[in-house]
Image: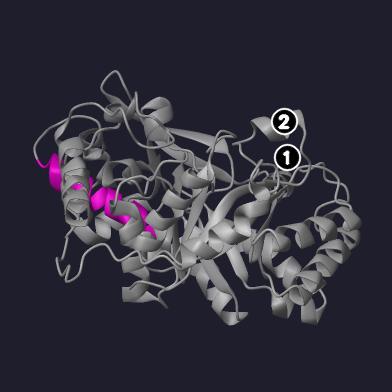
Amino acid sequence: MRQEKLEFLSLWAINNDMELPRLLQQLERLKKRGIQGVVLRLRHYTNVPAFLSDEYMDIVNQVILRAKELDMSFWLYVENTLTRQILMEEHPELTCQWLEFENGRVEIKTKHAVNSLSLSDTRLVIRYALDKYAAMLDEDAFEYITGFFSDEVGFIDSKEKSTCRECGGIPWYQEMPARYSAQKGGEIQDKLHLLFEDGEGAGSFRIWYWENLSDLLADHYYKPLQRWCTNHGKLFAAHVKGEENPLFALSYCGSVFNILRHVAVPGMDCCGRVPGNHFYPRIMSSLSAQFSNGESIAESLVGGGYGMTPGDFERYMLWLKSHGITKALIHSHMYTFTADGIRDWPASVPTHILWRDVTPSLIDDINHTNTRIKDGVTSLLICPTRGVMANFTPDQLAQMNEYNGENVSDSEAARISNSVVEICDELYN
């Protein structure tokens, strides 16, 4: 599916006290510079006014209504740090777990955190992050909200952490022994070492393990959020981490395909100002065409830097558009332009770049450019996710670049993962 136009959104990073006049002024300036909608994100927020307080909701309410007057779409960001802090303070019983392999033994490690594999934890997230908005915003403001955006929720901490890379561990959930016994028979404890070392039946057990973890993440986090959004007439957009290649995604979510087919607006992100490979934007538009409404989103120009030129911007957006991405979420616009704001995944686009006044014209040119790659591309590319799972051990990610999935060890899992990306690049170059 190929859309005629990209919708340009701004990830609006609120990094200081919320002041209504400043918020309204910035919304109007973003509109003037060609931005068609915003995702409101509390990033390094000072908590003034207090998150989810009446005063906070009153400000958000008025900003939404101004967005409506300006005909700008309005989204809310789900996993604000303050939400997790509230949950952890009020629920000290919350834990997440992972496996580590030491001296030939598998050990279960535990820490206090919001667990995205736990359905009860997700219900708390919904109660604090979504239900509050539905209950406290004015009816006309809540009705106008386009949707909610979820950002890089993986197996650990209800955010983007990966124990595979950080400590050589593997995510664990307490339901896994019962699931294994019901599906396979026997005790899972006898097999856990095969996640870390080769042995008889290692490949098939690894496939079972990672597929079940991925199913738990889909069933206990993404599906409940999607149901809530559907029931409230909102879109649910999400990107996981590691969409760039199957190996990168494995330790965060098991399979991008398994997670994002349950999301109304599947998404991706891309670091830098240079277009990435053809694999991950293509799979987003493909997933949406198969399982949803054809809409997809890309968190764009993440850390593109202040040296970015109009040409960089145009090439990047045409790459997304050529693969059927329908929404470019520019990362990000800094609410307060401080020293910390300058360093926080620059640049602040479009407001704080030198060529900001030409962005409306640039966006118009992008949306009037024919981006058809090839006529008659009819190939069906089947991603060998199970092959990656069967050959994966966590030590392979020790040196991985956590932002783009590069610099992994030479392994069979890496070769399989790279091969599918190379085939996709050959198809669409």
What residue lies at 55% left-to-right and 73% top-to-bottom? 235
Q: Is residue 364 left or right of residue 98?
A: right
Q: Amino acid at mark 2?
A: Asp
Circle 1 packing at 10 Å, graded few (<14), some (14-19), many (20+), is some
Q: Nearer the viewer, residue 159 or 123?
A: 159
Q: Nearer the viewer, residue 188 or 418?
A: 418
Labels 1 and 2 touching (C-beta < 8 A): yes
| Residue ID for mark 2 | 340
Q: Is residue 203 magenta?
A: yes
Q: Nearer the viewer, residue 413 or 4?
A: 4
Task: Give the percent coordinates (x, y) of residue 251.
Answer: 35, 42
Q: Amino acid at mark 1?
A: His
Determine the residue located farthest toward the top in the rendered image: 103
> Which of disc 2 and disc 1 is earlier in sequence?
1
| Residue ID for mark 1 | 44
Residue 414 vs 317, above or below: the answer is above
Residue 153 vs 191, above or below: the answer is below
Prevailing secondary structure of the magenta residues: helix
Task: Give the percent coordinates (x, y) of residue 73.
Answer: 65, 70
Magenta region: which residues?
A: 201-216
Q: Is residue 102 magenta?
A: no
> How many marks can you see?
2
Residue 19 vs 171, above or below: the answer is below
Whether residue 120 is visible here, answered yes or no, is no
Task: Give the percent coordinates (x, y) of residue 239.
Answer: 46, 55
Frontmost of labels 1 and 2 is 2
